[in-house]
Amino acid sequence: MSEILIQGGVSLEGEVCVQGAKNSVLPILAATILAGGEVLLEGCPHLRDVDASVDILRGLGCRVRWEGDALLADTASMTGCAISDALMRRMRSSAIFLGAVLARCGRAEMSYPGGCELGPRPIDLHLAGLRDLGAQIREEGGFLHCSAARLTGREIVLALPSVGATENLMLAACGAQGVTVISNAAREPEIVDLQEFLNACGADVAGAGSSAVVIRGGRKLHGCRYRCMSDRIVAATYLCAACAAGGDIFLRRAREEHLATVTASLRQAGCAITSDTAGIACRCIGRPRAVRPVRTAPYPGFPTDAQAILMAALVRSEGTTVFEENIFENRYRHVDELIRMGADIRVSGRTAVVTGVEHLSGAAVRCTDLRGGAALCVAALAAEGESRLFETGHIERGYEDIVRDLGALGARITGAEERN
Ligand code: EPZ
C-alpha cells in the first residue's frame, strides 16, 4: 500500500490492542545473535524495519521464521560476520548489529549506516565505546572493518545519552570479560526491555532505566521465549488522533508511565485520560486547547518521536503552542504538508510556533518520514473532507497496520495502491 485515503470529521470510538514496540524489537533481534539458540519473540510487530532485521539475520546464516504473531529466530547456525551495504541501507538503525556480531564472532564488517530524512545519524559514540572495550575499528571508504580478539569490561562514559549507543554497548559488553558500566546511558523504556530480554537469555545486566547500566559479561547465553513491551509511540499516535478528531477510545497494553509527558500535554489540551495495568482510556470532546511549550529531550523528557504527532493534534487548537526539537536537526519536514491542509505553523531553526486554526481542509499530502506520515493521518482525521496521503511506505516502517487500527476506532480510512 502506498496511499491512504481519510475522510475527516468523524470522531473515534472503540478499543485497539497496541502492537509490540518497534524500538524494542529491533535491538532485541540484534541481541538474539548473543543467545546462540532459539528465541521465540512473541507479539513481534510485522514492520518493514523488522523485515530488514530478519534479512540481516538470515544474511548472517541464522534461521528465522514467523509463527503467527511470534518470530522464531535460531542463531545457533550463524556463519557470517559481514552485513552487506544493501542491507545496511534498508534501515538506518542497522548499526545496532555491530556490538552483537563483534561479541559473537570477534569480527564484524559493515558499511556506515546512511543518514536518514531526520538529518545526519552519526555513530561516533557507538564506535568510541566499542574501542573502549578493546575493539579495533578501521573506517575505510564508507565501510567499518572491526575486530576484537578479546573485549574487556570497563567504565564507558557516553558524551550524550544515545539510545542506540547504549544498546549497542550493552550487547558488546555481554561478550566482554569482566564488568562494564555504561555511564550517562539513555533511560528509555526500550532499554529496560532489552535488559529484561538479555537476562531472560542468562545475561547479568542491571540498572537499565537509570543513567548507569552495569553488565557482568563473559556468561554463556541461551535462547528464550519473550514478549516485548507495547509501542509507546504508536499509543501516543492514537491518543493524539482522539485529541484531534474527538472521541472515546481505549488502548489495550499501553502503559501510561512510558508516555507520561505526552499524556500531560494531552490533558492540558483538554483530554480526559485515565489508565490502569490493562491500558489507557482517553476521552476528548470539542476543539483542543493549546498547551505549554513542548521541548523534546531524552527520556523521561518529551519523546522526539511524538513531536510531529502532537503537533498534528494541535493545529486545530484554540491558542498557540511552541515546539522545540532538540534531538534531531531536521524533524519539521511534516510542517509544509500540514500547512497544505490549512495549518498556521512558523518554523525558525529548532522552534516551531503552531497557531491553532478553526478549520483544516482535506488535501493531497506527502509522507516525508515515519512519524511525519503518522502525523498527517492524525491531522487528516480532524480535517473537513477527504485527504489523500501518498508515499505511505514510510509509515509501514513503524506501524503494523495504521489503517486497520484507526479503522477499528471508527475512522473512515482506507489503504490503496498509489495511483500513477
Ligand atoms: C533511537 O534512535 C530511535 N530508534 C529513534 O526512533 C528515536 O527518535 C531516538 O532513539 C531518540 O529517542 C530506534 O530505537 C531504532 P540516539 P537512535 O542515538 O538510537 C546523536 C523512530 O521514529 N548521536 O539516541 O539513532 C544523534 O545524531 C526513530 O522510531 C550522535 O551524535 O537515537 C541524535 O541527534 C527515529 N552520535 C541524538 O544523538 C552517536 O553515536 C539522539 O540519537 C549517536 C547518536
Image (cartoon, rainbow, N blue to C red):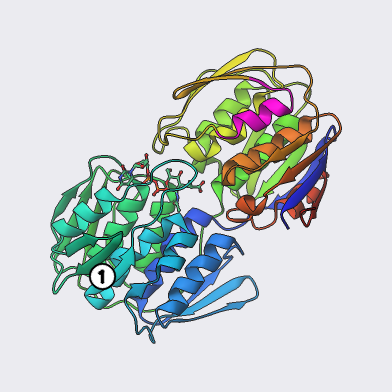
Q: Which range is magenta? A: 333-344
Q: x, y (%) of residue 183?
A: 22, 46
Instruction: Classify residue 219 by image quadrant.
Output: bottom left
Side of 105 relative to 49 (left or right)? left
Instruction: Classify residue 198 by image quadrant.
Output: bottom left
Q: x, y (%) of residue 23?
A: 48, 54
Rendered view: 2 above or below 84: above
Respond yes or no on whether mark 1 lies under 8 Å from ligand 1: no
Q: x, y (%) of residue 8?
A: 83, 35
- Near-viewer residue (341 or 179): 341
Rendered view: 236 above or below 21: above
Instruction: Classify residue 360 by image quadrant.
Output: top right
Question: Is residue 284 in view from this perspective?
Answer: yes
Name the residue that disc number 1 marks. 102
Side of 57 relative to 359 (left or right)? left
Question: Is residue 271 in view from this perspective?
Answer: no
Total numbered badges shown on the rendered structure: 1
Q: x, y (%) of residue 203?
A: 30, 69
Quadrant of the image containing the N terminus: bottom right
**Which residue sits at x=16%, y=58%?**
131
**Which residue sits at x=41%, y=49%?**
115
Amino acid residing under circle 1: Leu
- Residue extending farthest to the top is 319
- Near-viewer residue (305 or 243): 305
Rendered view: 29 above or below 35: above
How crowded pointer 1 is (Cα within 10 Å; few <14, some 14-19, many 20+) is rated as many
